[in-house]
Amino acid sequence: MVRRRKDGPGAAATARRAGFVAFAKPTRFNSAKVDCHQPGIHRPRRARIRAKGPAGSFIVTGQVAKALSVLVAAGVRGVTALEVNSWAYRLGAYVHSLRHDCGLAIETVREPHEGGWHGRYVLRSPVKLETVQ
């Protein structure tokens, strides 16, 4: 049995030294850092929509704003995650935010298919949209 001193190397360092395990240096996914505060470099603007619903007016930004505009445009037909899968990777999360943060009534209609079902989201609240700059 090998006793480890309190101030001695950890298990990873001991294993590396012994040649048992090859550890890679952790790297960040996006190693190229861009300073968006430099002159001439601008971060793309997020979509901002001011809407008036049954609970009053509110402002939504980003993907939640895009999801709201798609739900309003779809009307009674509704929208599924497959129909907006090119940009809305988390449509259920955007709908949850619209329901709980903005007080909108959005119905989830179950549509069965082979192997299970998927949800179609239908906006039931009357909503009027305005674009905010």
Image (cartoon, rainbow, N blue to C red):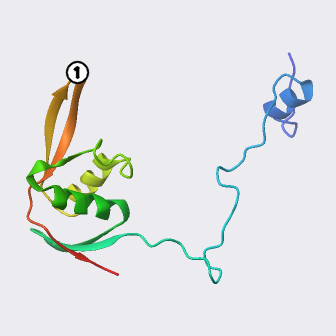
Badge 1 local density, few (<14 within 10 Å), some, or many (20+)? few
Where residue 33 appears, as percent x and y from the top left, is 68, 64
* Nearer to me, 75 or 125: 75
Residue situated in front as seen by the camera: 53 or 38: 38
Quadrant of the image for the N terminus? top right
Residue lying at 35% horizontally and 81% vertically, measured from the top left: 133
Where 62 sits versus 50, above or below? above
Q: Is residue 4 visible?
A: no
Q: Is residue 91 visible?
A: yes
Left or right relative to 2: residue 99: left
Q: From this view, report whether residue 8 is shown above or below residue 54.
A: above
Question: Residue 85, percent across and down?
Answer: 35, 46
For the image shown, how many numbered marks are present on the structure? Answer: 1
Q: Is residue 5 left or right of residue 75?
A: right
Above or below 97: residue 127: below
Which amino acid, mark 1? Answer: Glu
**Is 17 left, or right, of 123 in this rendering?**
right
The residue sitting at 65% across, 54% down in the picture is: 30
Q: Quadrant of residue 71?
A: bottom left
Q: Residue furthest right?
A: 17
Q: Secondary structure at mark 1?
A: loop
